[in-house]
Image: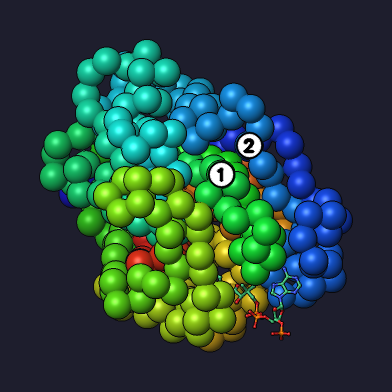
Amino acid sequence: MIRSVVCGFGASLPKRVMTNSEMETKVDTSDEWIVQRTGIRQRYIAGEGETTASLGEAAARVALQRAGLTPADLDLIIVGTSTPDNTFPATAVNIQNRLGMHHGAAFDLQAVCSGFIYAMTTADVYIRGGLAKRVLVIGAETFSRILDWSDRTTCVLFGDGAGAVILEAQEGEGTNQDRGILTTHLRSDGAHREKLYVDGGPSTTGTVGQLRMEGREVFKHAVGMITDVIEAAFSATGTSAEDLDWLVPHQANRRIIEGSARKLGIPMEKVVVTVDLHGNTSAASIPLALDTAAADGRIKKGDLVLLEAMGGGFTWGSVLLRW
Ligand code: UT7
């Protein structure tokens, strides 16, 4: 049975760090409020010349180097992003060109904060279907460019960055002991679109627009949706919380992460938390967290790792994999 195995990972952050105390100089907020309500202490903000494509390219180069591969070895690039460099062409083809890759295919996938989960799932389908042997999966965002910097209820929450993994087709036994992706579960419900959206776009206003969110409404749904797709992953594979080595959640809010882990009986020692350092980087948050925990030696070869996200749309989903 073909499995999609992670053979490389990488990340890239903008040079500029913005702390909560700097945020206090921009809007009526406080470090205490931000930390207490979200767990965020700082975020990275893209500067001149730093874009979704440049950050994605840098993350991809690290992943290729760790995998011992070159762009010539890739068949496909999928970029999860809601903040593309341009409305078109896709950020993925921009990154493809920056990498000097002129074969195969590249496309973007837009599922807001669930973008990396959607992109991993799509890559897994291509690999298991025999359509690609190696897929570069990137989550990259510059949310700072679509924030309303006068709205304290949203601008303190988000940050910029990119993360990448390379998935490679490898033969497995068809058991839970195989390395690679074991199961994926995607969900969406467009009835919730106005709770988290951007108030512009090419076909409506002809502008990029700015992020709008009813935070409390999103919060209300988050834990239930996250536990739904985690339970789906457990029941599809006959696994349970005790079998997990690591939960790597989308990093939106520490309280949502803790609430989901508590409901599922997953101790916080097994949860990778980077929201304090990166803020909410939407589709980039999971690969940034994966990079952090794999690079510092927490996530090791053979570990059972569960990824989950929930965000605008609403979209939500999970990926269970053996590292
Ligand atoms: O990644 C995609 C998914 N997004 C999320 O998962 C975000 C989900 N939502 C959340 O994380 C939380 O709802 C927030 C962090 C956005 C807000 O936390 P909350 O505990 O739900 O606060 P709230 O919206 O109920 O606001 C409480 C108070 C309000 O004041 P009043 O009405 O009680 O006087 C707000 O005006 O906090 C006020 N407030 C702030 N105060 C200081 C809102 N933003 C700020 C701020 N600084 N930045």
Q: Amino acid at mark 2?
A: Ala
Between 89 and 60, the residue placed more toward the observer is: 89
Q: What secondary structure is found at the residue carrying circle 1?
A: helix
Which corner quadrant of the figure contains ligand 1? bottom right
Using residue 17 as the reference point, say whether residue 295 is left or right of it: left
The tag earlier along the polypeptide, 2 or 1, is 2
Q: Position of residue 115 (x, y in %)?
A: 39, 53
Give the tally of numbered discs: 2
> Residue at horizontal 42%, vertical 18%?
98
**What kind of residue is marked 1?**
Arg
Q: Which residue is mark 2?
A: 46
Q: Quadrant of residue 176?
A: bottom left
The residue located at (51%, 65%) in the rendering is 212
- Residue 119 in sight: no
Mark 1 highlights which residue? 145
Graded by Cα atoms within 10 Å as few (under 14), some (14 to 19) or many (20 or more), the crowding at tag 1 reads some
